[in-house]
Image (cartoon, rainbow, N blue to C red):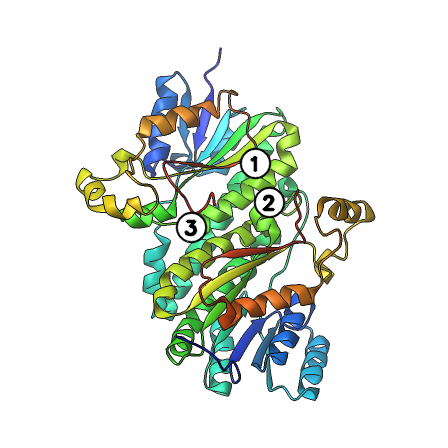
Amino acid sequence: MMMTEQRSRIALITGATRGIGRAIAEHFAKEDCRLALAYRSNRKEADETERVLKDRGVEVLMIQADLTDHVACREVVDRTVNHFGQLDILVNNAGTTYDGAFAVMKPEEYVPLIRGNCCAPVLLSLYAAPHLIASAEAGRNGAIVMMSSMAGITGKEGQVPYSTTKGSLIGATRLLARHFGPRGVRVNALAPGFIRTDMVKALNPKMYNHVLEASASPRMGEPQEVAGAAWFLASHSSSYINGQVHRIDGGFLR
Amino acid sequence: MPMKKLLFDNLDGFLGKALAEAWERQGGCVIDASCRGGVSSALSDISSPHGVVFTESVIDEATLLSKAEDDPEQAVVFTESLHQQTIEFLANCRAATQAMMPVKQGNVLALCVDDVAARVLGLPQSPIINQARAAATKSLSKEYGRMGISYNTVVCQPSREMVEKSTWRASRDAMKVYSLRYSPVETSDYISFLLSMFDGSTIVNGGLICLGNGVMEMGA
């Protein structure tokens, strides 16, 4: 089905007030989407994001939610649909990390990571699915974009639980694509490498230099570069791409 | 010479069970952790395990997903299952690593069944847990490979014996999509390879090894 009019599409983006999520929100706004933006706790960042987008004339619904709670996942989708009347794009961007030597890590330290990084995106996708199917049927190109990670593909020392959750998202992308693809909903994933966000700010200079040396494009990525790819996967331009994982890592050929 | 001990998280999976039987036939000792309170508990009772094997998942994620689609409660059941399996796998990997670190040797093997071929043949599909296992073993090999511990994930297409002959016949055309004149691999051929991963003859650590004929999604 041809989709020529992207205006009036509704996007729900999780973890949308900082880093990659914020960049995605701003990019989708430029593409005339109306936005439901979920954030966990930082009210100040949420207010700032809302203000910037509203100043540009974008209709925004801010939703505070702890996505490690399955009830909150349901409410985020319900509030989005109740407010806008439809949902066309889900970007499962929210994620956290817990780094350290795995052998001495306590399970209670990484349990929330698994709920938030792995279970929440699957739950949100399931709750959003009926609306995305309706979107596809209406020619609005229902799509899900998962935010995996290079660590989920290649593995990463010091990030065993994080990479595990990001690996699981790759499997979830394929499972959901297979399940919902016949009804017009596409599910794809992005696997960013070293992107200039708070999550990689702690990178020591030695590691930073290693990243540069190992990359075909010897620099860190910018959140906006991930946002462009997220829009591509959410838009009609990628209408024949489904169940795939796309690395955005500057050619990190480690 | 003490018997080399291979610890299995359970013997529910066809391939895991076949590997356990082969290990015993060649004089090794098999320990089924599911009969001893789980991997962590079993590891606290035995000294110097030669290896720990996580047998293939028999939970069908596709079925759970189908049930979850129209039922919010089933959606929670599905994700709780994922959560539980992931937590358990990580806890078991941690216990295995802690047990192997003092002796600076050991092998951790995660067995998986390729979800594409499984789907065609009507077997349980577990792409989420498979990919989680692959990412975890890659990360662990990068972190603890230097200590002489190897971590690998092996993804097998269903072996000939895992599926009825009539199912193979009925699925022949579907499998041709992946490989013309598709012919399933015998379980014994898989087992020969898997045994080599425990005798030191296969130098691989952090591998995601796909076994079978034709294109498989995880290896792509």
Q: Is residue A7 above or below residue B208?
A: below
Report the amino acid beneath label 3.
Pro
Report the amino acid beneath label 2.
Gly
Q: Nearer the viewer, residue B132 or B10?
A: B132
> Which label number is shown at residue B46?
none
> Which of disc 1 and disc 3 is earlier in sequence?
3
The image quadrant that residue A92 belongs to is bottom right
Give yes or no for contact between labels 1 and 2 (Cβ–Cβ under 8 Å): yes
Q: Residue at x 38, y 59 (%)?
A: A178
Q: Position of residue A96 (x, y in %)?
A: 63, 60
Mark 3, residue position: B127
The image quadrant that residue A227 belongs to is bottom right
Q: Nearer the viewer, residue A122 or A91?
A: A91
- Disc 3 crowd rating (10 Å Cα; few below 14, some 14-19, many 20+) is many
Q: Position of residue A49 (x, y in %)?
A: 69, 79
Q: Is residue A80 above or below residue A195?
A: below
Which chain contains the residue that carries disc 2?
A
Residue A69 shows up from this direction: no
Measure the C-alpha gap from mark 1 to mark 2.
Answer: 9 Å
Q: Position of residue A233 (x, y in %)?
A: 53, 66
In this image, A19 relative to A134: left or right? right
> Which label number is shown at residue B206?
1
Measure the C-alpha gap from mark 2 to mark 3.
Answer: 17 Å
Mark 2, residue position: A155
- Disc 1 crowd rating (10 Å Cα; few below 14, some 14-19, many 20+) is many
Give yes or no for contact between labels 2 and 3 (Cβ–Cβ under 8 Å): no
Q: Residue at x 64, y 48 (%)?
A: A159
Task: Name the element at disc 2.
Answer: loop
